[in-house]
Amino acid sequence: MVIWTAHAQAQLRAIHDYIAQDSPLYAKRVAQELVHAAAPLKELPHIGRKVPELDQEAVREIGLYSYRIMYELKQNGQVSILAIIHKRRHIEPTQIPRTSPLEN
């Protein structure tokens, strides 16, 4: 199961809203494609690469357009989408949101 965290959902909305300032149609398309790109993680959770800033097997990412879709593999087989971050943005390991251990 692929679960979007509240943080990732807020980032998806922010990306949509930013793009919509110029093109509501393209904004909707990009948002839909970001969600669609995460769907195969249910069946292929290891398809992405490890997030280099963390170098932890359980925190991985896939790319789409200019974005990194970061996700965490849970012990129960669930995949949690943690964040959608622009590829040009410098990010420190402490800035990568993690799900709580209670969600395992």
Image: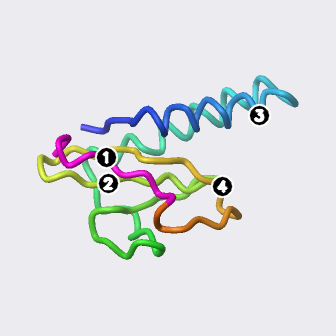
Mark 1 to mark 2: distance in Å? 8 Å
The mark that comes first in sequence, 1 or 2, is 2
Q: Amino acid at mark 3?
A: Tyr
User: Which circle marks residue 18 in the picture?
Assistant: 3
Mark 2 to mark 4: distance in Å? 18 Å
Question: For mark 2, what is the residue?
Answer: 72
Mark 3 to mark 1: distance in Å? 26 Å
- Considering depth in this image, is 34 or 17 the residue closer to the camera? 17
Q: Amino acid at mark 1?
A: Thr
Q: Nearer the viewer, mark 3 or mark 1?
A: 1
| Residue at 47% from the left image edge and 63% from the top image edge | 94
Q: Is residue 16 above or below residue 96?
A: above
- Reply yes or no: does residue 25 show up in magenta: no
| Residue at 16% from the left image edge and 48% from the top image edge | 77
User: Which circle marks residue 86 in the picture?
Assistant: 4
CB atoms at circles 1 and 2 under 8 Å apart?
Answer: yes
Question: For mark 1, what is the residue?
Answer: 99
